[in-house]
């Protein structure tokens, strides 16, 4: 059975590895099929594709689209997207424009808390990509405002905290529409990570299904074993396919390593069930 990891990040969003280094690390870890899914951007895919070809692993072109669902930010992973599709690119460009404005707004709010120069600090961590909360978090840790990323998010960057700016991201139906326009499949990322009641989570899946959504991440680097089984059951109930992705952001998160994701629970229909993988074709033809 090939090992799938369908959710990872590079320096083109808030990961710390280049696409090439990510692909090589995935290869070394035993990943056979890797999706690069940077936040609201596909610019790392060309480098990832070239590196995957050289490394002999399958690269699934992906993206993680930011969505606002009510007051909740939800992430939708697009898998197998044609990155040059205009509707997808226009949609992602709009999200990055909001991201830029939000970064300046976060910095203004942090300045009011007596933390100057946060925009420049976060930008330095973003290394040319759109500035996100993780870049602010890294700056704030470096500047001594908290001991690690976890702490700094809790203290400054989540709802109710001084550096939090409410999201104005895509609608759920837009995210699915852009991904489908680009020929991809749409899956709700890490559903167990949102602080949704069981009822709200079912509502989200119901709406996602009504939008034409394809699947949910059942196995995720941010899910517990209990989550896997609960979500596998929900996927089946809602007629959604099951995906698996580490949400790897780099070796600074030593508790998630590429190639270590467990298999999907029995009974799941994998999101890759109908994929015409080059790898499996190679295997068949010898
Ligand atoms: P953004 O899309 O800029 O709002 O940032 C979202 C990203 O922040 C996620 O993809 C994670 O990489 C990171 N993140 C969110 N919450 C936390 C947390 N509590 N601890 C560490 N990283 C987090
Ligand atoms: Mn991230
Ligand atoms: Mn996410
Ligand atoms: Mn992610």
Image (cartoon, rainbow, N blue to C red):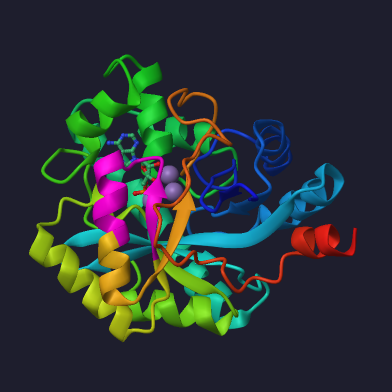
Q: Identify which residue is drawn at 18% across, 63% down.
A: 201
Q: Which residues are magenta?
A: 216-232
Closer to us: 87 or 109: 87
Closer to us: 89 or 54: 54
Residue 203: image quadrant is bottom left
Q: Residue furthest right?
A: 286
- Residue 157 lies, in percent from the top left, at 24, 39
Residue 225, relative to residue 58: is it above or below?
Answer: above
Would residue 140 be found to the left or right of residue 61 on screen?
A: left
Q: Is residue 139 visible?
A: yes
Q: Identify which residue is drawn at 60% across, 80% down.
A: 183
Would residue 110 be found to the left or right of residue 86 on screen?
A: left
Residue 139, relative to residue 159: is it above or below?
Answer: above
Residue 199, relative to residue 16: is it above or below?
Answer: below
- Residue 255 lies, in percent from the top left, at 43, 25
Q: Quadrant of ligand 2?
A: top left
Would residue 257 be found to the left or right of residue 109 on screen?
A: right
Closer to us: 34 or 121: 34
- Residue 39 lies, in percent from the top left, at 48, 54
Q: Is residue 115 visible?
A: no
Q: Identify which residue is drawn at 40% across, 69% down.
A: 215
Q: Identify which residue is drawn at 75% across, 57% down.
A: 46
Q: How many marks?
A: 0
Which corner quadrant holds the C terminus? bottom right
Would residue 117 be found to the left or right of residue 183 on screen?
A: left
Residue 222 part of the magenta segment: yes
- Residue 150 lies, in percent from the top left, at 28, 28
Residue 9 part of the magenta segment: no
Residue 53, relative to residue 83: is it above or below?
Answer: above
Closer to us: 193 or 115: 193
């Amino acid at each position: 059975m090939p090992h799938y990891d369908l959710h990872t990040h590079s320096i083109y969003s808030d990961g710390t590895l280049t696409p090439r280094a990510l692909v090589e690390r995935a290869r070394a870890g035993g990943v056979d099929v890797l999706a690069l899914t940077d936040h609201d951007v596909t610019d790392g895919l060309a480098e990832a594709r070239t590196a995957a070809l050289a490394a002999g692993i399958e690269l699934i072109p992906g993206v993680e689209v930011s969505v606002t669902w009510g007051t909740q930010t939800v992430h939708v992973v697009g898998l197998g997207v044609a990155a040059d599709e205009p509707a997808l690119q226009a949609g992602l460009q709009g999200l990055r424009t909001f991201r830029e404005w939000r970064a300046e707004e976060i910095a203004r709010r942090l300045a009011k808390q007596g933390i100057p120069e946060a925009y420049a600090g976060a930008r330095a961590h973003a290394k040319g990509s759109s500035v996100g909360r993780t870049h602010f978090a890294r700056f704030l840790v470096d500047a001594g405002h908290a001991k690690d990323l976890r702490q700094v998010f809790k203290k400054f960057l989540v709802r109710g905290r001084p550096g939090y700016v409410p999201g104005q991201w895509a609608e759920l139906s837009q995210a699915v529409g852009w991904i489908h326009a680009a020929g991809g499949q749409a899956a709700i990322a890490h559903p167990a990570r949102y602080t949704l009641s069981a009822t709200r989570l079912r509502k989200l899946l119901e709406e996602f299904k009504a939008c034409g959504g394809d699947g949910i991440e059942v196995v995720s680097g941010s899910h517990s074993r209990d989550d896997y089984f609960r979500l596998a059951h929900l996927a089946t109930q809602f007629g959604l396919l099951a995906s698996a992705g580490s949400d790897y952001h780099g070796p600074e998160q030593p508790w998630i390593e590429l190639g270590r994701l467990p298999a999907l629970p029995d009974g799941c229909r994998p999101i890759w069930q109908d994929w015409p993988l080059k790898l499996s074709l190679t295997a068949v033809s010898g």
